[in-house]
Amino acid sequence: MTPTFSVVTISLNQAAFLRQAMDSVLSQEGASFEYIVCDPGSTDGSRDIIAGYDDPRLVPVFEPDKGPADGLNHGFARATGAIFCYLNSDDVLLPGALAHMESWFARHGHVDVACGHALAIDAQGRTLRRVWSEPFTRYAVATGAHVQIQPATFIRAEAFRASGGFDPADRSNWDGSLLTSLYLSGARISTVDAFLGCYRLHPGSITMSGRLASQHRASAERNFERLMGRPMRTSDLWAGRALRLAKHMRHPVRTLERVRKGPLFRAP
């Protein structure tokens, strides 16, 4: 029986969080799915964790890759579902996320990519605050004023394949690069007003450590040029700030929560 969803997780030496990620997927109810977990060569016991699950929906992939984006491509090359999503090994899906999205896609047949909201959590799983996906409008996304939350994003299989998948050369912002490819290939992108996943901030994560900051900036500049057909100018940086301000003014409740609880993206 063909599953509705194909969920892919890539993991490399993430044993501390991997079981929570896997349990959050395998405990989903109300929707059919397969779960593809790719590990290119962990040495911290992660492979033992994966092998320890006895679940016919789980598809382990133990083969080398050329980085996270390439690993995701390996996983989705095996996918048979109608709707794709991917979950980092330190993130989690919220209960009922797949059932909610199965119903949502059935009502929105014109949408190819759906981006929901998420909770930001810490290493212990405690909620830091809520984060929201914004509409994918070309210039706002190009300038970084609008973002879409990766562990709450769902993609029709045919749209993913038409986009060419992930860029293996992008090792810092492969989710943003994929959305750019989806948009440029004609995918129709929408937001879902529901909290569907959690992304974890901890000292080892790319976001909090800032270890790939320069690569992330270079990726952002490439995405801008792909979306806008020209290099980024200084005026675009100011325009992005104006668009972010406008966003905050449109959503005062979200803005107040950000002010009260503080920024998320800072190194410890």
Image (cartoon, rainbow, N blue to C red):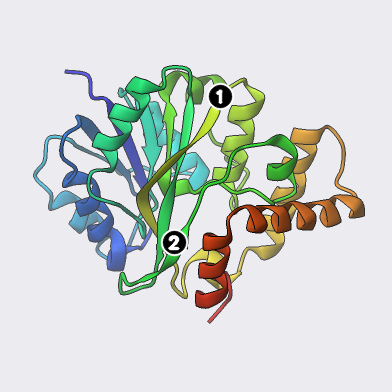
- From this view, report whether residue 221 is shown above or below residue 167: below
Left or right of residue 25: residue 132: right
Residue 60 image position (x, y, % from top left):
25, 41
- From this view, report whether residue 15 is shown above or below residue 186: below
Q: CA distance from mark 2 to mark 1?
A: 25 Å
Viewer-proximal residue, 266 or 243? 243
- Residue drawn at x 29%, y 42% is 97
Viewer-proximal residue, 46 or 64? 46
Q: Look at label 2 and name its amino acid.
A: Arg
- What label sits on residue 175 in the rendered view? none
Residue 259 location, quadrant? bottom right
- Residue drawn at x 29%, y 28% is 103
Residue 183 image position (x, y, % from top left):
62, 28
Q: Secondary structure at mark 2?
A: strand
Residue position for label 2: 130
Label 1: few (<14), some or many (≥20) within 10 Å? Answer: some
- From this view, report whether residue 154 is shown above or below residue 43: above
- From this view, report whether residue 130 is shown above or below residue 110: below
Q: Look at label 1 and name its amino acid.
A: Arg
Whether residue 67 is visible, yes or no, is no
Residue 90 image position (x, y, % from top left):
36, 60
Residue 112 image position (x, y, % from top left):
48, 24
- Residue drawn at x 36%, y 73% is 123
